[in-house]
Image (cartoon, rainbow, N blue to C red):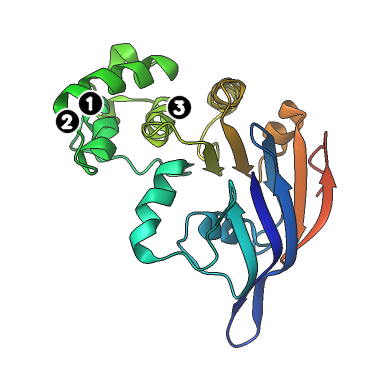
Amino acid sequence: MIKFRNVTKFYSPDIYALKGVNLRIKPGEFVSIIGQSGSGKTTIVKLLTAEERLTSGSVQISGWDISDIHHREVPILRRQIGVIFQDYKLLPQKTVFENIAFALEACGAAYKKINKIVPQILKVVNLASKYDKYPRQLSGGEQQRVGIARSLIHRPKILVADEPTGNLDLNNTREIVDLLRKINELGTTVLLVTHDREVVNLLKKRVIVLDRGQVVSDQPVGRYVI
């Protein structure tokens, strides 16, 4: 479970990114967080991954209070949370296989383990035949699927997708949405941060609306209402 309890994030001199936010997201949920630019969506992502520290309140993940997490524990936290970005963040000089394997190599995983896990993840995102291609040889949708594969490499309990379809056309957008659904159906909690009306309305899942750092709507089966 993800729990935000009276969370406030303040930037001096007088900017509140979040103000008294209370949220509970159950294991296995698929939740979209929407709002205008500056509403606090990205701040929620940064607090979950300990990229930012809150000003007051508490953030818990599966009972672990990460509000004042020690820097030595941050890598442990981030292995539990996969993050997908709008701009893919792929390494251009590495192949699809190498881009995905890199996350395991950085943790000191054995070559045998890497050779076992990476092909499994490639099948999940339907890129097994592209393992030896470089990012420049892939479409935008394929590059994003590599990004998703990389985010799944540690088999995280939570997947945070920060504007994952922002650079994609409609067909690729729908493919990514279908893949996120599939991942969610396998038991992973998915938190989708998006401006994309089409995606939110297509999902027919829980929708949380932020405005000026506060939750103004939380619908169990919502639509894009901004």
Secondary structure state at the residue bearing disc 2: loop
Residue bearing the label numbered 1: 114
Q: Please rate how many residues cluster around mark 2, counting C-alpha atoms within 10 Å: few if below 14, some from 14 to 19, many from 20.
A: few
Q: Residue at x 33, y 61 (%)?
A: 72
Name the residue nearer the viewer: 51 or 3.
3
**Where residue 95 appears, x then y in whole percent?**
21, 28
Residue bearing the label numbered 2: 110
Task: Examine the rendered structure and indicate whether residue 69 appears above or below residue 223.
Answer: below
Residue 141, numbered circle? 3
Q: Earlier in the sequence, mark 3 or mark 1?
A: 1
> Decide: marks 1, 2 in contact (CB < 8 A)?
yes
Secondary structure state at the residue bearing disc 1: helix
Q: Residue at x 83, y 37 (%)?
A: 220
The amino acid type of the residue labelled 3 equals: Gly
Q: Residue at x 63, y 48 (%)?
A: 2
The amino acid type of the residue labelled 2 equals: Ala
Task: Examine the rendered structure and indicate whether residue 147 appears above or below residue 89.
Answer: above
Residue 99, numbered circle? none
